[in-house]
Image: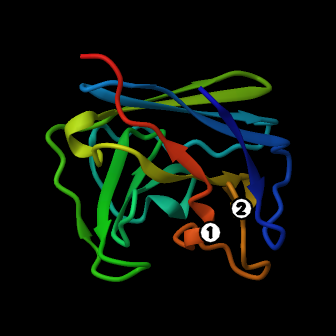
Amino acid sequence: MQTHELLAHPAHPPVAIRRVEAKVIGRNHQWLRVRWRIDGVGKLVVPQFAGKGRQDGLWRTTCFELFLRPRGAEAYCEFNFSPSERWAAYDFDAVREGMRERAMPREPDCVIRLGQAMAIFDVAIPAAGVPTGVAAMNLAAVIEEEGGRLSYWALSHPDAEKPDFHDQSCFAAKLEAPRGP
C-alpha cells in the first residue's frame, strides 16, 4: 500500500511535529484499515480516553480524517477519528453542502500507540460503512500541540490562507476496491 506524506498548512505550522504520513494498510469486504504516523511528538496533545461513541467537533484537537468520493460522483463522505476513541461520519451532497450523519453498521475501532519520538494511530472502519468500489481519497489530520497550537495536515492545500480538507483538489489519492472475501 502506498504511503502518503501529508503537508502542513503553511499558515498553521507545527511546533515540534516533523512529519505526518498516512496510508491504507488493508481493505477487504469486512474492514478498511488506515494508519497515520506522526514524527516529533514531544509536544503532542492526545485527547483523553472517552470510550467509543459518535461526537461532533473532534477537529478542535488532535484527530485524523478520511474523505472518500466514489468515482464519478459529486457526493462524498467524511470520517473523523480521535485518539479518545470517539468518531464521527458524515455524508455531503457536494462540497460542504447537504451535510448529514452517515449511517454506520457498527463503530470503528481506533487505537493510538505513543512513543517518545513518534505515534501511530490506526483505525478499522467497517466496510459496510464505506463507499463500495474505487474512490478519490483525502487523508488528513489536525494535530494539537502544547499551548493550543493546531496544525492542519493534508495531501494538498490549495488555499495558502485557510486550510480546507473538503476542497476537491485535496482528494489526491485513490482508494482501490476491496480485495478478497
Q: Residue at x 26, y 34 (%)?
A: 126
Please name whichever residue, 106 or 33, is drawn nearer the observer in this view of the structure: 33
Above or below: residue 30 compared with residue 100: above
Q: Residue at x 61, y 63 (%)?
A: 170
Query: Is the residue under label 2 in contact with that under label 1 (CB below 8 Å)?
Result: yes
Quarter of the image where one finds residue 94: bottom left
User: Callout 2: helix, strand or loop?
Assistant: loop
Q: Residues within 10 Å of mark 2 (few under 14, many from 20)?
A: many
* Side (left or right) of 14 relative to 145: right
Circle 1 or circle 2, nearest the eye: 1
Three-letter code for the amino acid on which mark 1 is drawn: Ser
Horizontal and vertical percent position of residue 125:
33, 36
Of the 4 image quadrants, the one containing the N terminus is: top right
Three-letter code for the amino acid on which mark 2 is drawn: Ser
Q: Residue at x 84, y 68 (%)?
A: 10
The answer to whether residue 150 shows anywhere in this view is no
Q: Which residue is mark 2?
A: 156
* Side (left or right) of 23 relative to 28: right
Q: Residue at x 71, y 61 (%)?
A: 156
User: Callout 1: helix, strand or loop?
Assistant: helix
Q: Residue furthest top?
A: 181
Q: Which residue is mark 1?
A: 169
Please name whichever residue, 29 or 106, is drawn nearer the observer in this view of the structure: 29
The answer to whether residue 158 shows anywhere in this view is yes
Quarter of the image where one finds residue 8: bottom right
Q: How is the image coloured?
A: rainbow
Horizontal and vertical percent position of residue 45:
64, 46
Q: Residues within 10 Å of mark 1 (few under 14, many from 20)?
A: some
| Distance between mark 1 and mark 2 Cα atoms | 7 Å
Specify which label sits upstream in the sequence, 1 or 2: 2
